[in-house]
Structures are given as structure tokens and as C-alpha cells.
Amino acid sequence: MIAYIIRRTIISIPVLIGITILVFVMANLMPGDALSAMMADDPSTTAEELDIQRERLGLNDPLPVQYIRWLGGVVTGNLGRSLINGESVLQAVATRVLPTVQLMGTALIFAIIVGVVLGVISALKQYSLLDNVLTIVGFAGISMPVFFLGMIFVYIFSLQLDWLPSSGMRTAGEDFNLLDNIQHLILPALSIGLLRSVHFMRYTRSAMLDIMQSDYLRTARAKGLKESRIMTVHALRNALIPIVTVLGLALPTLITGAVFIESVFQWPGMGLLFIRSTTQRDYPMIMGIVLIISIVVLLTNIIVDISYAFVDPRIRYES
């Protein structure tokens, strides 16, 4: 297992470097740069002053030189500084990590619980009215963009019913308290979690239907085991293997959803910081956020691969 983890980690390194190259090139292909955006806010800035600033920040250097300089800083733990306000990228990201983790963690837990439970019920009630309704809801959920669902929630629960706040992480002007934080969290987490639960539901249903036709479940029934024990101990455990795969695939889409939802609800996380950095052409901030997200995704995939062996004892990577 240790050899597998080491091999899997080493394989991820060139993937990570490839991602940073791709994002660096795409970020630099965008029209304009941070200094041009700043010039729009301050029309008195002359072209000569901008050129001096570009030279000072190294923006006139060839792209390979800029990339290698950035990569060298990353190796030493320096992700650079924002071109907009000079703030350390690492420090800016560190202050945004907890809100994003809170949002994504809540949404993921909700999606797993709701998706797995509904998937099992749908499989047990195959072709029933409930199964057909859940299937239709599933197709609708897959087709719906997360930001659209977020805006629907804002319109209904904030603007029309006035039940929940529509933006921020806490009420402006008030000290932080948990109840207020949860009230602000419900709508953005529900927007992401509901759509992700659809994926867990469909995979759970499919896995449960396959397993329910297997010979060892017939044998368990022939031995007189209770149906509840057969489903929970024998069927659901094996159905968890494809669900673990979905869990690994869910993280990138969760991050994508968080980027849009944080923008819709003005949730002060990494997604909102990424959107603002993109509009301001703040390349160091964009690269720093993408690097950290890429590392988290790659580590998650490694953990998911390792977890196969614990979910299914038949899997042994040493062999």
C-alpha cells in the first residue's frame, strides 16, 4: 500500500505542473492585464508610468521566464503578491479557505446523505411512482446550472418569503454567532448540495439494482437472513464502491459550483476571490488559487483510490 501511495503521488506531480502551465497560458491569453484594469480606475495614469510598473513587476518578460520565476517562488513557499493591492497570495487564500471548506463540506455531507438514501429507496421501489418521480427530478437536477438554482432560492426564500439572508457569511455590523452563520449558510449550501445529491442518487440506485440481482444475495435470502440485514450489511456495502468513485469525481464539480455560488451569495470564500481576481487580471492570485485547488483535487483522488481497499477487501494494490 505504501509503495502504491508513493507511486500515485509521484505520478500526480507532472499532472500538477501541466495544470499550472495550462492555466498560466490561458490567464495570459486574456485581453488586458492588472495594470490596464487599474488604469481604468485611475485615468490620470500615463502610459509611461504603466510601462515602468510593468517593467518593475516583470510583466514585460517573456511568458516562459515569468512562469519559471513563479514556479521557483512556489518551490520556496512564495506564491507571489497581488498585482492589485500587493497582498500576499498565500495570506489572501488562507483567509478564504475556511469559508469555502464550510460551504463545500456542508454541501457534500448533505449531498451524500440525501443522495444515498434516495438512491436506495429508488432501487427498492423500482418502477414505482416514487421511483419515476425521483428519476425525473434527477434528470432535471443534472440539467440545471447551480447558479440558476441559487438565484431561484434567493428569489423565493429571501426576496419573497424573507426567511433567510441572501448574501454574506454573517449579518453586517453584528458580531459573529453560529446561528446567524448557519442562516447565511443554508441557501448556498442547499444550492450545491441538492444538485450534487442527484448524482449520488443515480449512482446509488444503479449500483443497488446490480447488486440486488447477484447470486450471493439470493444465497443470503435462502439462508433466512432478514431483508433489512441483507440490504444494509451485504448490498449497501458493495454499492459503496461506485459511490466512492463518484465522491472523488464530485470534488472538482463542487469547487466549480462553489465558485459560482460564492459569487451569487457573496460568500467570502476562495471562489469569490477567484472571480474578482479574474475580472482584475490579477495573475499571481489566479495562479495561486488554481495551484491550491489542484493540489486538493489530486490529494482527494489519491485518498479515494486508497479507500477502495478499505471499502472492498478484494482489492489489493500490492498485487
Image (cartoon, rainbow, N blue to C red):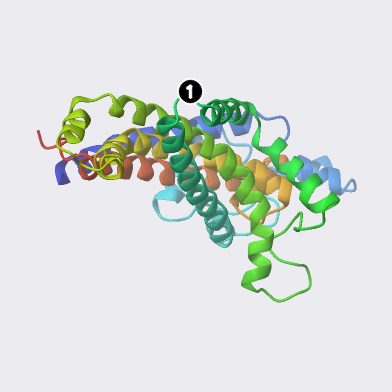
Spot occupied by residue 6 in the image (x, y as percentages of width and height): 21, 43
Point out residue 227 in the picture as x, y percentages from the top left corner: 29, 40
Q: Position of residue 248 (x, y in %)?
A: 39, 38
Mark 1: secondary structure: loop
Name the amino acid, label 1: Tyr
User: Is 283 on the left-hand or right-hand side of 73?
Assistant: right
| Residue found at x 54% / y 34% | 24
Which residue is rendered at x = 77% and y = 51% of the image?
A: 157
Q: Nearer the viewer, residue 130 or 275?
A: 130
Say if 135 sits above or below 72 in the image.
Answer: above
Image-quadrant location for residue 176: bottom right
The residue wearing badge 1 is: 127
Q: Dot 1, crowdedness within 10 Å: few (<14), some or many (≥20)?
A: few
Q: Determine the residue positioned at 63% across, 52% down.
A: 82
Q: Is residue 217 left or right of residue 47?
A: left
Using the rendered view, name the quadrant where residue 179 is placed.
bottom right
* Residue closest to the far right: 44
Relative to 220, 299 lies left or right: right
- Residue 278: x, y in percent? 67, 40
- Above/below status of 79 relative to 192: below
Towards the viewer: 274 or 79: 274
Q: Quadrant of residue 217?
A: top left
Location of the N terminus by quadrant is top left
**Residue 294 visible in the snapshot:** no
Residue 160 shows in the view = yes
